[in-house]
Image: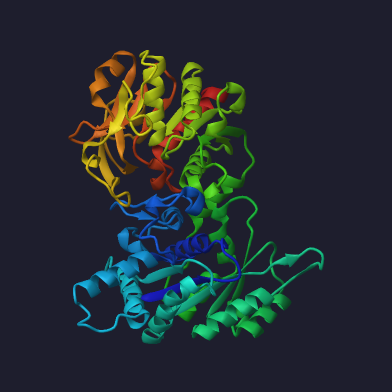
Amino acid sequence: MSIKYIFITGGVVSSLGKGLTTAAIGNLLEARGLNIAILKLDPYLNVDPGTMNPFQHGEVYVTDDGSETDLDLGHYYRFTKSPLSKVSNATSGQIYETVIKKERKGEYLGKTVQVIPHITDEIKNRITAVAKQSQKIDVVLIEIGGTVGDIECLPFLEAIRQFRYEHHDDCVNIHLTYVPYLKAAGEVKTKPSQHSAMILREIGIIPDMILCRCEQALSDEIKEKISLFCNVLKQDVFDEKDVDSTIYEVPLELHKQGLDERILTLLSLPAKQADLSAWKEMVAIAIKPKQKLKIGVVGKYVDLNDAYKSIYEALYHASIAAHVDLDICKIESDKVDHESQLEKCDGYLVPGGFGQRGWLGKIFTAKYCRENNIPFFGVCLGMQIMIVEFARNVLGKGTAHSVEVDPHTEFPVISLMEEQKKIEKLGATMRLGSYPCLLKPESKAYLAYGKKVVQERHRHRYEFNNEFKEEFEKHGMVFAGTLNEGSLCEIAEISHHPWMVGVQFHPEFKSKPLEPHPLFTSFINAAKEAKWGKS
């Protein structure tokens, strides 16, 4: 059987949820017994999102092989078992960089290098590279970032047109549009969807399916209208309305409408009946009323939900496993200098980040949690905050700091990694990707994981300075995890505290709703016990 390809495009407005929709479709195909791979094509000219401000682009998701990628790959990971690596995300910047390097080497034999065919050929190469990750892949899903009609998207759409022409029996295009409800008129409007599909047709792509984002389910009359004006069969017009409780309902809602069945029919794919039993059970637990647990996330990017997307989802996964209703309180770190500014939460998490802004508020949070025996979880920068606070207020080193913030500090308890000192470029130069971590027996981390060695993903430049290790240990700091066969501190804990743990890596990148990360589960359970006692 030949490999099949599903292209997901978006129209009308941005932020429709193409990434979530792509992940949900992948979830349904896997439930049918198919093996999938997913590719995100991003139209921006950055080589990767690694140097982009989180306010611009949201979080940077990191794969096991150390690629800094779009946050939608986090959706793919949480919803599916798709292999994710450097070939799973391609930007216009990467495409153009590759073509220009080939031209400089003379690989085009002196020909004029153009968008067509050279850029479009490279885009098609990226699609086939994803399909070749494994011999077992049945379906490749390709999400095209941006909105149809944007000039940045045109090379990708032209590449899709060519690819469909070359693989005409093996491709389906699902076009995601927005059907707005005008409150004043009391009706939904299909015109934006009609125009979006028309732009696609002008480019040479006729959508096979229309998926309509909307606030409420669409009537048969509306679907018939979209079918007529968008040149799509009515049975291939679906609505994707806002879910009531959790994004993990989306695959179930699409399955109810028969979306996966139609995809199988259009692609002539043999597949078994969908087994969504475990997913349904997880969603049932998630939406069931239960006692509320309040967790404070103290960071400097809390105004943008996508900046800490994987953190929020990992907390949510753990709360489902712990059967609690999670209430995340987002606290701006640069506004915290008194405990009255910290909401009355049952636990606090300080996520990763860079730069000086918000440091004092994060240190105040760590001190508040340490002195009041409140569960605290420090992730990446959060662990470094925990170290600096301990040095200042337990070891008595009042000027202790990270050299990232104060290069001339008298007590550099957080220092630049040796391998980073000669690096001048910022992009893709940090410690990135998966590394082994050796756990200390009987530590909180060891009890959470239940094994001696784990693999976790990194994205950092700075580390704990081992010159201070002995002094920290004498005062109750436990270095519970180290880089396997090395001395790099990976996990720090405070021995006389109920649950105060910092990790140098990013455990949030490896959490799934059906497989919550052990450290997040342990943290939520500690907060649960602090509030209600052992159950």
Identify the residue shown where x is 45% and y is 36%.
521
**In which image quadrant can residue 491 be found?**
top left
Q: Position of residue 118 (x, y in %)?
A: 31, 79
Asked if one can make out residue 428 in the rendered structure from this viewpoint, the answer is yes
Image location (x, y in percent) of residue 136: 30, 68
Q: Residue at x 42, y 25 (%)?
A: 500
Residue 132 percent coordinates (x, y): 28, 70
Q: Nearer the viewer, residue 330 or 56?
A: 56
- Left or right placement of residue 427 versus residue 141 in this view: left
Give the colour scheme of this rendering: rainbow
Relative to 414, residue 3 above or below: below
Q: Judge left or right: residue 340 versus residue 99.
A: right
Considering depth in this image, is 391 or 520 the residue closer to the camera? 391
User: Is residue 66 shown left or right of residue 175?
Assistant: left
Q: Nearer the viewer, residue 21 or 393?
A: 393
Q: Position of residue 130 (x, y in %)?
A: 32, 68
User: What's the residue at 38%, 24% (across, down)?
Assistant: 388
